[in-house]
């Protein structure tokens, strides 16, 4: 804990509070909870209320980082690719076709970026897993409770929560996440989190088992074809990581390359057999909706292919050109339902290349750490990133709120553990175990 200087005076109590590890833990829970429940909060208290909460959290985590600056290893903590992407989003206000919306969207992005960076810097990976796990448990229990109320007790949709009340028919359910895909993705990330908690024994066995059942039931009841497909990939990747951790270090690189080759072959096969796969997961209607939307997005991408239309995050239906994306008889989209296409539309080809580089580098670092480090907790970032990245082919969740904040946490943690800048400066000081 850093010691306040003589100028602190009456601010001594505030300094002690901000430097308290328990307060840091509470801030982490508050930040994760706000990010996960942002759509619910926006529905209940409006954008003004949600922004006020975000401003308060950003000020508090900034103060906490300031007073605990001596405890943070600052060298090489922020990945350059992350800084470039956020910086490019900020610069897009200069050529944006909707500058005020871009200013708001960039501020929203920066707020969750700051929260993610703060969590990564002040908490260990296992502490981060516990914080996410605690929030996920609460959100999933509330979601199931709301579905029971709507679908079984009053048998009426709860419109302002986006709950359709389909629990009696075994789904699809939305919980408090507004859509089945969002609930399914949250439950899938929670399933990974609860699994790590179970293996590391960071919670009681009863809590871990009940949580796993809750998350698995939520994934299945969401009946999201997208998430069911992602679940298969995540489970296969978990098996691959388990295998890699058992392989001798000198043979690990060969097996890493073999797994990479197998993944590429499977991706090619999935593309060739896409019609059959879509049929198996009953995703024809969702794919049709997305294809119609993607065609409209690509039409507008062609007008500003290099620089994009300007960053906005969530689409703004009251701002041009977003009204043109409305599809007759369908819900009004608030994203391109594909993160890569969304980035291309908002930041152009330049932004897309930066985003792809950021995603590839972050995942590669996390995957290597998952296979090399002794603690199984390092598998959490790799599997969570995989769920976010694969689902980003059909959703844009990774670009906003808890999806983006989680990505930032994993990116900063991975860069801190496998930073080329630190490796270059301290190559002779890295223990042999960390080089493996």
Image: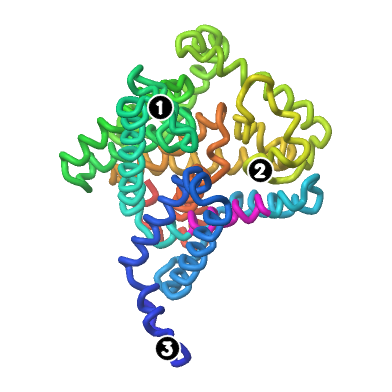
Q: Nearer the viewer, residue 312 or 278?
A: 312
Q: Secondary structure at mark 2?
A: helix
Question: Residue at coordinates 67% horizontally, 24% vertically from top-left?
Answer: 293
**On screen, residue 208 above or below 291:** below
Q: Nearer the viewer, residue 304 or 430?
A: 304
| Span of residues in magenta | 104-117
Q: Nearest to the eye among marks 2 and 3: give it.
A: 3
Give the dominant element type of the magenta stretch: helix, strand or loop: helix
Q: How many numbered tags mark residues here?
A: 3
Q: Which mark is residue 156?
A: 1
Q: Nearest to the eye among marks 1 and 2: give it.
A: 1
Question: Residue at coordinates 46% horizontally, 60% vertically from top-left?
Answer: 118
Q: Which residue is mark 3?
A: 10
Q: Nearer the viewer, residue 276 or 250?
A: 276
> Residue 56, percent across and down?
50, 64
On the image, which quarter does residue 197 sit in? top left
Q: Is residue 359 magenta?
A: no
Q: Which mark is residue 223?
A: none
**On screen, residue 222 above or below 350:** above
> Residue 28, percent across and down?
39, 57
Q: Secondary structure at mark 1?
A: loop
Q: Which residue is mark 2?
A: 354
Label whose residue precedes the other's in the sequence (2 or 3): 3
> Residue 219, percent across and down?
37, 27
């Amino acid at each position: 804990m850093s010691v306040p200087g003589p100028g602190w005076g009456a601010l001594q109590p505030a300094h002690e509070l901000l430097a308290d590890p328990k307060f840091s833990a509470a801030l982490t829970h508050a930040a994760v909870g706000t990010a996960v429940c942002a759509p619910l909060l926006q529905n209940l208290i409006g954008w003004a209320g949600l922004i006020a909460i975000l401003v308060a959290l950003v000020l508090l985590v900034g103060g906490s980082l300031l007073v605990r600056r001596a405890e943070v290893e600052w060298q090489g903590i922020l990945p350059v690719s992350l800084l470039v992407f956020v910086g490019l989003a900020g610069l897009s206000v200069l050529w944006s076709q909707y500058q005020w919306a871009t200013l708001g969207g960039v501020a929203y992005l920066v707020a969750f970026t700051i929260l993610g960076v703060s969590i990564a810097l002040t908490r260990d990976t296992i502490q981060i897993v516990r914080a996410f796990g605690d929030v996920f448990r609460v959100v999933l229990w509330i979601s199931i409770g709301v579905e029971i109320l709507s679908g079984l007790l009053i048998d009426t949709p709860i419109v302002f929560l986006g709950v359709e009340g389909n629990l009696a028919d075994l789904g699809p359910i939305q919980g408090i996440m507004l859509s089945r895909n969002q609930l399914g993705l949250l439950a899938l990330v929670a399933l990974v989190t609860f699994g790590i908690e179970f293996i590391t024994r960071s919670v009681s066995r009863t809590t871990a088992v009940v949580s796993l059942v809750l998350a698995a039931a939520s994934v299945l009841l969401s009946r999201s074809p997208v998430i069911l497909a992602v679940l298969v990939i995540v489970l296969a990747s978990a098996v691959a990581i388990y295998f890699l951790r058992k392989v001798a270090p000198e043979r690990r690189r060969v097996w890493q390359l073999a797994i990479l080759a197998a993944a590429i072959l499977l991706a090619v096969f999935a593309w060739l057999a896409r019609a059959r796969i879509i049929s198996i997961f009953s995703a024809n209607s969702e794919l049709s909706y997305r294809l119609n939307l993607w065609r409209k997005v690509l039409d507008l991408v062609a007008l500003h292919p290099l620089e994009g239309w300007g960053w906005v995050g969530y689409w703004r239906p009251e701002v041009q050109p977003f009204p043109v994306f409305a599809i007759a008889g369908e819900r009004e989209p608030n994203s391109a339902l594909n993160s890569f296409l969304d980035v291309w539309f908002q930041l152009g080809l330049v932004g897309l290349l930066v985003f792809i580089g950021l995603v590839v580098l972050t995942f590669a670092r996390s995957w290597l750490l998952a296979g090399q480090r002794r603690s199984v907790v390092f598998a959490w970032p790799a599997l969570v990133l995989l769920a976010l990245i694969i689902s980003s082919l059909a959703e844009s969740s990774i670009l906003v709120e808890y999806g983006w904040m989680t990505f930032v946490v994993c990116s900063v943690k991975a860069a801190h553990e496998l930073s080329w800048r630190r490796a270059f400066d301290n190559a002779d000081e890295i223990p042999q175990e960390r080089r493996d």
